[in-house]
Image (spheres, rainbow, N blue to C red):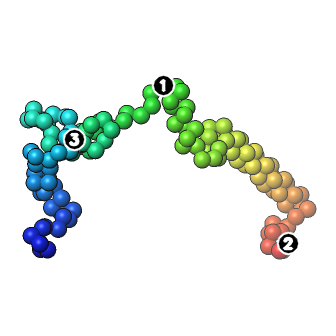
Amino acid sequence: MLGGFKKTTKRNLLKGIPWRFGPNWPGKRCEAKTRKGTPCQRPAKLPVGRCRLHGGASTGPRTEEGLKRLADSKTKHGRFTKIERAKARARAEQGRIIRRELKELETWFIDHGHLKKNWRKDWH
């Protein structure tokens, strides 16, 4: 201990609250009531005049305008929008159709003697 002061660490952070923010502390207090019904003694840090425990977290935007603003701010690129995903699904389906047709053509050419059965190995 240096000069009689105890080092504040993560473990003993809450232990020091009564003597750090006691009844004579001049700062702004949290305006919330505890479960006992007594006023909270913690310092108010948030703009709403509450401590971090009683701050009243935001429930997020609820209006159409607010939701659109949130979506616009969170969109970094358009790669995963519904429209782009639908386009990607359509391209994938087109690729499957083309590969299926090529497989049918390959089978026909092999059956009619235009290609050998292992023509790919010979081709490389």
For discs 1 and 2, the disc positioned in front in the rendered view: 1
Q: Position of residue 23 (x, y in %)?
A: 9, 45
Seen in the picture, residue 122 relative to 23 is either above or below; the reply is below
The residue under label 2 is which amino acid type? Trp
Q: In which quarter of the view is residue 29 placed?
A: top left
Please name whichever residue, 105 or 51, is drawn nearer the observer in this view of the structure.
51
For discs 2 and 3, the disc positioned in front in the rendered view: 3
Q: Position of residue 112 (x, y in %)?
A: 89, 58
The residue lying at 79 percent from left, 49 percent from top is 98
Mark 3 Cα within 10 Å, few/some/many (few <14, many 20+)?
some
Q: In which quarter of the view is residue 14 placed?
A: bottom left
Is tag 1's residue or tag 3's residue first in the polypeptide sequence? 3
**What residue would you read off at disc 1?**
63
Q: Quadrant of the C terminus?
A: bottom right
The residue under label 1 is which amino acid type? Thr
For discs 1 and 3, the disc positioned in front in the rendered view: 3
Q: Is residue 98 visible?
A: yes
**What residue would you read off at disc 3?**
28
Distance from Cα at disc 1 to Cα at disc 3 = 33 Å
Q: Position of residue 83 (x, y in %)?
A: 66, 37
Q: Return the mark for residue 85.
A: none
Q: Is residue 111 visible?
A: no
Distance from Cα at disc 1 to Cα at disc 2 = 63 Å
Is tag 2's residue or tag 3's residue first in the polypeptide sequence? 3
Q: Return the mark for residue 123.
A: 2
Mark 2 Cα within 10 Å, few/some/many (few <14, many 20+)?
few
Q: Position of residue 92 (x, y in %)?
A: 70, 47
Please name whichever residue, 43 or 24, is drawn nearer the observer in this view of the structure.
24
The residue lying at 14 percent from left, 74 percent from top is 2
Horizontal side of residue 114 vs 23, given as left or right: right
Distance from Cα at disc 2 to Cα at disc 3 = 82 Å
Horizontal side of residue 27 vs 107, given as left or right: left
